[in-house]
Amino acid sequence: MAFALAGPWAAGFHRPMGLRIDVQPGVARQPDEEFASIYDRLRTPGDRLHGIPRIPLGDPCLALRWREADGEFYVYVEDLHQRRLAGYTVFNRLIEVSRRADRHVRAPHSKFDTPYQRRGLASAIYRWGLDAGLCLVTGARQSEGAHALWHKLGRDYPLGHVELRDKTLRYLGPTVAPEVLGELHTRMLLLGRGWTLARFAAATGMQM
């Protein structure tokens, strides 16, 4: 089962686009400067970010804009009233996984300006991706807030733990001991809508 995005994301999902670096982890920038730069690009005719699809978020003050580049998804939250960027989520590819698993999993990372934190925005974006059929795997590190968010999402989507080593996923179970959870090779896994463990294992080669 490959990604099967439904709803607004489905249109144009498979259209190839050139790789663009919207978020540069190696560049030290203040959030205000970074967010202002992205927002300016969203509003500048001729820029690759200008005119990308805008999707209502259920809040008249906020809207989502999204784009795809090289298999990664960039979701921006725009404050329509304040005319500024509230933050973004990137669904990154994982270089640690095999090519087979790369077709099905992404690692989400979010960054929101202080006034927009703890408002459920990252949760709404993650749910959107999960409902569209994305399966999510954590990176090597998680903040306390991100860890809590994943457990909250685990009430509605299958949540488990995997070991990621030598480009191979091995299922560890729904819970693990604290010392196992602390290992860098231990990751959390959320299955998107329509997936089962058996189907995910068959599609990705995950060891059970």
Image (cartoon, helix red, strand yellow):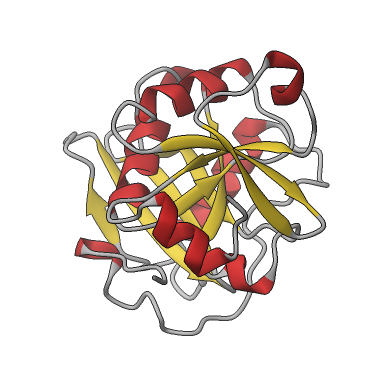
Could you tell me how many numbered marks the image carries?
0
Give the residue drawn at x 62%, y 23%.
176
Query: Which residue is nearer to you in this view: 127 or 103?
Result: 103
Q: Where is residue 106 in the image (x, y as percent from the top left)?
A: 55, 55
| Observer able to see residue 43 | no
| Residue extending furthest toward the front | 208
Q: Position of residue 118 (x, y in %)?
A: 42, 17
Q: In this view, does 155 lie above or below 62?
A: above
Q: In which quarter of the image is the N terminus?
A: bottom left
User: Relative to 121, is 42 on the left or the right?
Assistant: right
Give the residue drawn at x 54%, y 34%.
173
Q: Quadrant of residue 94?
A: bottom right
Q: Position of residue 42 (x, y in %)?
A: 45, 58
Give the residue drawn at x 77%, y 39%.
185
Q: In which quarter of the image is residue 21?
A: bottom right
User: Relative to 1, is 9 on the left or the right?
Assistant: left
Query: Which residue is nearer to you in this view: 43 or 29?
Result: 29
Query: Which residue is nearer to you in this view: 103 or 146?
Result: 103
Q: Is residue 191 above or below residue 177?
A: below
Q: Where is residue 112 in the image (x, y as percent from the top left)?
A: 51, 30
